Image (cartoon, rainbow, N blue to C red):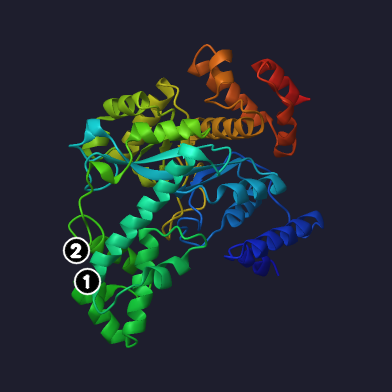
Amino acid sequence: MLEEPERKLDSFNAAEREQALSALLEKVRAGEITLFQPGTDVNLHCHTFCSYNSYGYSPSKFAWLARKAGLAVAGVVDFDVLDALEEFLTAARKLGLKACAGLETRVFVPEFSARVINSPGEPGVSYHMGVGFPKANFKGELGEFLLNLRKTAQKRNRDLMGRVNIYLKPVELDYERDVLVLTPSGNATERHVCLAYARKAKEVFNDDNALTQFWVEKLGPEAKLLETPESIDLLNLIRAKTMKTGSAGYVVPDKGSFPLMADFNQFVLAAGGIPTMTWLNGLSEGEQALQELVEVAMGAGAMAINIIPDRNYTPGVKDQKLENLYQVVELAEKLHLPVVVGTEMNSIGQKFVDDFDSQELSPLLGVFLKGAYIIYAHSVLQQRAGLGYTSNWSKKHFQGIAEKNEFFQRFGGLIQPEKEDSLADLSEDATAQEILEQVCN
């Protein structure tokens, strides 16, 4: 009975998603569905189908599942667009979920032009984020910058597809007909292109043996052991063998392929978000220079750091990855950088939420929850009153980052979604203590 409205939350039709959420909320009000009370689990880095979610989750679907699971704070992050923001924040408010939204892209870091950071095989290129955006639509230069992120990403995809088409012939894609139909808003990613190739190959070779032989010829003998037509292992192999470093479709990006980190950070700040550096696992040459990397990022405007905890430990094993995780969190704490965590969910097998009760992550939960409350507090204060973490109000009312973090953490923990509307009455003259008192009343 519950499966049907939940399934409709992933419809490409926005009206159908809205109706499905309303139907689920009615079941909650009628006592037919019980939602867990918010606990301490967080996921502020979930991709939706506005870029690529391996389970097809829409912004509304993730909001529903996050509230259903009792997440303390939830956040969406999509590649190069803010398409999920309005729907996600609207759904979250209806559900009583503390929420925020951001975007992820790749940037160029001149100081690391000879060192790989966290984009494999691409020296100087780093994944990078903006979190806690108050809105998705901008005019003028901000609107042009955001639009250019989308256009540039789609051009990269089209150019990549053209090269891969030559290599995979007779399996050839048409971008509009085969790729864009897999997205609700035209923001395709490499993972969409991989899925499109898998489906096109099935059309061309409708004999299973012929299909397997094709992939063996194009991807290597390991393809013989993979399930067809579109298993996750096959999709990952298509991506690795046709689109990544050393493959037929790969072209080394130059300095102009991605925006400078400093320029992207300026956009994020002007748009009301928090510029956020990302950290993979500390194993690359660039990330091994952790102190230098963080200093460069902060010098370019970064004010928070994103980590994917599940990438950084093996349960029951104390190894270099786990040591690196503790090291980066320790440095972030020392520098008062809020830590943003999540699981991504853009590849099959990634968890809905991290195992924060695990021996490896439980010592860090307080840091992760603090970061989540800070980002949520910024999001609602910036959206409702222009008094966010990066606002002029914050610059005037706090002596330093530690004091600012303490306020935003407390506010994010205290404020409840049903009281967000009352924040519109706040003025720039309000003190931090007055704001906290208003939340408590």
Number of the label disc, if any, that sits on residue 166: 1
Helix, strand or loop for disc 2: loop
Q: Identify which residue, 384 or 222, lies in the foreground.
A: 384
Q: Amino acid at mark 1?
A: Ile
Q: Position of residue 421 (x, y in %)?
A: 73, 35
Disc 2 + disc 1, Cβ < 8 Å: yes
Q: Earlier in the sequence, mark 2 or mark 1?
A: 1
Q: Position of residue 82 (x, y in %)?
A: 51, 47
Please identify the residue farthest to the top as the structure is shown.
399
Q: Identify which residue, 150 or 102, lies in the foreground.
A: 150
Q: Residue at x 66, y 50 (%)?
A: 91
Snapshot quadrant of residue 409: top right
Is 6 left or right of 207, judged from the image as shown? right
Name the residue that disc number 2 marks.
248
Residue 231 visible, this orientation: no
Q: Residue at x 69, y 58 (%)?
A: 21
Snapshot quadrant of residue 3: bottom right
Q: Residue at x 62, y 51 (%)?
A: 87
Q: Amino acid at mark 2?
A: Ala
Image height of 406 relative to 68, above or below = above
Between the C-alphas of marks 2 and 1, the distance is 9 Å
Image height of 317 relative to 325, above or below = below
